[in-house]
Image (cartoon, rainbow, N blue to C red):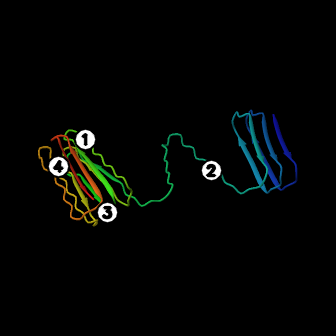
Amino acid sequence: PTLQHTQTEPNNQTLTHHDRSQEPTLQHTQTEPNNQTLAHHDKSQEPTLQHTQTEPNNQTLTHHNRSQEPALQQMQTEPNNQTLTHRDRSQEPTLQHTQTEPNNKTLTHHDRSQEPALQQMQTESNNQTLTHRDRSQEPALQHTQTESNNQTLTHRDSSQEPALQHMQTEPTNQTLTHHDTSQGICDTSITV
């Protein structure tokens, strides 16, 4: 029943309203002049449609609403150079840890023949790529270091074997501790 147009200053504008429904009010209010065309097409039962513009701008707003589509979220804060790889193969026979640069660190390994957990503790940060492959049926644990910090670490542990070997060719600041609860043996090698 009501169509109101209020304009405070003259401008070059075309206002077009097509009302084909029962809505009571359509209001267009503009306070400053601009070159703009406002068009409203309403074919529903909505009671009020208001357009208010105070200053001219060049803007395009587009909204795509798809109620059945799944959400896709991407968040990235800063670039980094890092590769993390985890491969879990329950029947494979190898666990390898590879370190590419030397550092002062403490490696602690707790080997329990019936437990699936593998814990690693490192006290100082360095630039390295960590690859973890967990295979629940495998007896062997190998530590391999590719770049020279003047040391070689070799650990071979089987549930029925009593041998624990630590080989180091050059002195470094490092503490190696191995607890094997299946044999009740604690072997600690400290080199300073």
For the residues labelled 3 and 2, the Cα–Cα distance comes to 50 Å
Q: Which residue lies at the image location 54% right of the left edge and 43% below the top edge?
A: 66
Residue 117, above or below 34? above
Q: Nearer the viewer, mark 2 or mark 4?
A: 4
Which residue is disc 3 drawn over?
100
Amino acid type shown at disc 4: Asp
Question: Counting other residues with Cα less than 10 Å from the Cα at mark 1, is it few (<14), some (14-19), or many (20 or more)?
Answer: few
Cβ–Cβ under 8 Å for marks 3 and 1: no
Amino acid type shown at disc 2: Thr
Q: Earlier in the sequence, mark 2 or mark 4?
A: 2
Residue 116 marker: 1
What SS does tag 3 mark? loop
Cβ–Cβ under 8 Å for marks 1 and 2: no
Amino acid type shown at disc 3: Thr
Residue 64 placement, left or right of 116: right
For the residues labelled 4 and 1, the Cα–Cα distance comes to 15 Å
Question: Counting other residues with Cα less than 10 Å from the Cα at mark 4, is it few (<14), some (14-19), or many (20 or more)?
Answer: some
For the residues labelled 3 and 4, the Cα–Cα distance comes to 24 Å
Q: Which residue lies at the image location 34% right of the left edge and 61% below the top edge?
A: 103
Q: Earlier in the sequence, mark 4 or mark 1?
A: 1
For the residues labelled 2 and 4, the Cα–Cα distance comes to 63 Å
Q: Nearer the viewer, mark 1 or mark 2?
A: 1
User: Foreground residue, 78 or 54?
Assistant: 78
Cβ–Cβ under 8 Å for marks 3 and 2: no
Which residue is disc 2 drawn over?
62
Which residue is disc 4 drawn over?
157
Residue 150, above or below 19? below
What SS does tag 2 mark? loop
Q: Earlier in the sequence, mark 3 or mark 2?
A: 2
Q: The N terminus lies in which quarter of the figure?
A: top right
Q: Which residue lies at the image location 23% right of the left edge and 39% below the top edge?
A: 115
